[in-house]
């Protein structure tokens, strides 16, 4: 049983989706989706513990030995991502019961849970698989279910947002397929580890360079790398609250993982960063993302849209860490996957609660919120502090590592810039504080009071995580450091 | 370089660019999806064409056959076709819903309606 954990990690949520569609009962669907999320989390934690103990786990699907068969390969890097995705799913599911019941028509409920299971299976599959084409299939499973989940949003703008995301996402996925197609032509293999050993022999060929570019642009679209982020703000703003919280905390993070995997463990640092200027390009785009998206976030009239633009900026910090390509930078980048997922997940869950009570989360609704929803407001402030990177929160730990990484490279100006841009985050979080705590309510809430406990508890669990992982860093920084070591060892 | 021997790549790249151009240049949501379909289909060609060797057979172990064509690209593309069909189906379903909600499938008219609705908000 235990040796089949890598397969079960993906197969269980995948099987639950058709089961839910067959039974068609919302209550059963929720129970099954929640159960499978928690089981997935347990499996992910068991796998992570095994990886720390014995090193990389290789699992041959159908007993076909790699590199011929599809291999599931768990190492410190993707074990971390698996835990992240499964944990967010396990926390969002209880919340979804309250939020989905309020936002969707009853006949859509079971469909949402089926889509969620597919999306979870897809995201876990991307993280665990060691086969590049299998990765594409999982990428599309998760993306297609995400488009459909976004289209479930109440406003008609959700449909347009889903359509735009579908077009951009499909272009991204197709670019990725072109890239791996070129790699397959040059090497004759689809296995990630096998690719890494065979690529150096043909690395001078133009198809390999074209493949690297196609994969960078394709995955860049999926992870909303500036300026390929146009799909993100609308998709996050108009999707149902539970969907926004789930995809904001997982989908882009998994794509970042794919980029790290390809850059460091397939193409290798010498090709990507030393011989080609991908690091410099990524650095410039990251800084542009941080500055422009954070500035745009300041002027958004709506909390969800503000958080969406803030996501683009925060992804900039992650790619910034990747572009530094040294131990502290990568540790910061990988740990920021987790820390940002916690903070943004918490914020979107809380914003969903505000939408539930006030019918919207624009700053007009938020005025005077602290008196009516004190716990929600305080949660937003705490998670917002983590977004800024105040000491004592999880966000601080990653900013610290990014600054150390920048200084190690000799980029003093960049280190100053990281601190300075945190001040922009301070401005947009302060906008919330001012509206919620210092303005008189202008808008009468239809149903005043906190959101129901089934939604508030998961949201606060994530808020507590922002503080807990800021003080006790053995999981996020410790594990990320481990993963960064693995990634860098592979490069040499 | 033998240009005649590379004509399949030329066709692939032409289809790829044509598809991508339609997605970017057309304002009609259905036409955009058609462009997306062409773009995805060109990738099928990118995989399939190099897998075929002239004079090669299916990989059957036998004394008579010496050159084999690679069957793996076909299998991969079978999967990619399924993905493409699912994407197109979902895209068209969303367009149907957009037409129900907005009464149009032209991108500029949808944007105009959205900004009009934005202006009428208090």
Image: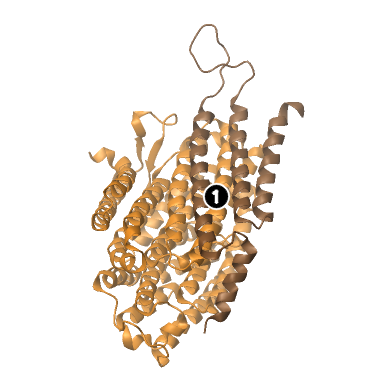
| Whether residue A451 is visible | yes
Q: Colour of chain A?
A: orange
Q: Residue at x 72, y 30 (%)?
A: B7
In the rendered view, tell whether residue A72 sits above or below residue A273: above
Label 1: few (<14), some (14–19) or many (≥20) C-alpha neighbours in 10 Å: many
Instruction: Judge whether A27 appears above or below A433 on screen.
Output: above
Residue A15, given in percent of the width and then of the height, sits at 31, 44
Q: Position of residue A236 (x, y in %)?
A: 47, 65
Q: Picture quarter containing residue A249?
A: bottom left
Q: Which residue is mark 1?
A: A170
From the viewer's side, name the closer residue of A32 and A26: A26
User: What residue appears at the point 62 percent right and 21 percent down from the top-left corner?
Assistant: B53
- Residue at image x 48%, y 39%? B82
Q: Chain of mark 1?
A: A
The brown-coloured chain is labelled B
Q: Looking at the picture, tell me which residue is in the foreground, A327 or A391.
A: A391
Quarter of the image where the N terminus of chain A is located:
top left
Q: Taking A231 as reference, is A486 left or right?
A: left
Residue A288 appears in the figure = no
């Amino acid at each position: 049983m235990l040796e089949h954990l890598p397969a079960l990690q993906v197969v269980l949520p995948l099987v639950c989706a058709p089961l839910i569609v067959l039974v068609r009962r919302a209550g059963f669907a929720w129970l099954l989706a929640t159960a499978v999320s928690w089981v997935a989390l347990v499996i992910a934690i068991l796998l992570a513990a095994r990886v720390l103990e014995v090193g990389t786990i290789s699992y041959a699907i159908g007993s076909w030995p790699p590199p011929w068969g599809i291999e599931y390969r768990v190492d410190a890097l993707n074990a971390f991502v698996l835990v992240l995705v499964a944990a967010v799913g396990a926390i969002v599911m209880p919340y979804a019961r309250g939020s989905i019941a309020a936002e969707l028509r009853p006949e859509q409920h079971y469909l949402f849970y089926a889509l969620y299971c597919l999306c979870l299976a897809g995201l876990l599959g991307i993280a665990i698989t060691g086969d590049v084409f299998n990765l594409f299939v999982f990428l599309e499973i998760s993306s297609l279910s995400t488009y459909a989940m976004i289209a479930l949003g109440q406003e008609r703008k959700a449909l347009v947002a889903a359509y735009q995301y579908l077009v951009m996402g499909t272009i991204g996925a197709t670019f990725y397929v072109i890239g791996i197609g070129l790699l397959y032509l040059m090497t004759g293999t689809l296995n990630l580890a096998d690719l890494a050993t065979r690529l150096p022999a043909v690395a001078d060929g133009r198809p390999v360079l074209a493949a690297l570019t196609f994969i960078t642009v394709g995955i860049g679209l999926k992870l909303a790398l500036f300026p390929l982020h146009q799909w993100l703000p609308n998709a996050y703003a108009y999707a149902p609250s539970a969907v926004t919280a789930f995809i904001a905390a997982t989908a882009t993070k998994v794509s970042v993982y794919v980029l790290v995997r390809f850059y460091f463990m397939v193409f290798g640092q010498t090709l990507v960063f030393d011989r080609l200027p991908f690091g410099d390009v990524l650095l410039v785009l990251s800084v542009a993302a941080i500055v422009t998206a954070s500035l745009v976030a300041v002027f958004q009239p709506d909390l969800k849209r503000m958080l969406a633009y803030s996501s683009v900026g925060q992804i900039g910090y992650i790619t910034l860490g990747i572009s530094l390509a040294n131990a502290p930078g990568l540790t910061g980048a990988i740990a920021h996957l987790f820390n940002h997922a916690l903070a943004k997940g918490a914020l979107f869950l809380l914003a969903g609660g505000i939408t539930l009570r006030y019918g919207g989360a624009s700053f007009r609704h938020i005025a005077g919120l602290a008196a009516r929803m004190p716990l929600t407001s305080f949660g937003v402030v705490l998670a917002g502090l983590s977004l800024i990177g105040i000491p004592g929160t999880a966000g601080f730990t990653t900013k610290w590592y990014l600054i150390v990484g920048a200084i190690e490279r000799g980029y003093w100006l960049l280190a100053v810039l990281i601190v300075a841009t945190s001040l922009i985050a301070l401005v947009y979080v302060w906008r919330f504080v001012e509206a919620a705590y210092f303005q008189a309510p202008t808008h009468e809430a239809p149903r005043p009071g906190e959101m129901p406990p089934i939604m508030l508890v998961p949201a606060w669990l994530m808020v507590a995580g922002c503080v807990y992982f800021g003080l006790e860093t053995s999981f996020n920084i410790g594990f990320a450091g481990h993963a960064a070591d693995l990634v860098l060892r592979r490069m040499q | 370089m033998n240009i005649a021997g590379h004509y399949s790549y030329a066709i692939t790249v032409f289809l790829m660019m044509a598809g991508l151009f339609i997605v970017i240049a057309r304002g009609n949501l259905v036409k955009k999806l058609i462009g997306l379909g062409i773009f995805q289909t060109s990738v099928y060609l990118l995989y399939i064409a190099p897998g075929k060797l002239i004079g090669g057979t299916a990989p059957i172990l036998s004394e008579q056959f010496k050159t084999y064509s690679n069957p793996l690209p076909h299998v991969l593309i079978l999967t990619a076709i399924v993905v493409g069909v699912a994407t197109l189906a979902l895209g068209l379903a969303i367009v149907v819903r957009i037409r129900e909600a907005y009464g149009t499938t032209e991108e500029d008219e949808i944007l105009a309606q959205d900004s009009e609705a934005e202006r009428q908000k208090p």
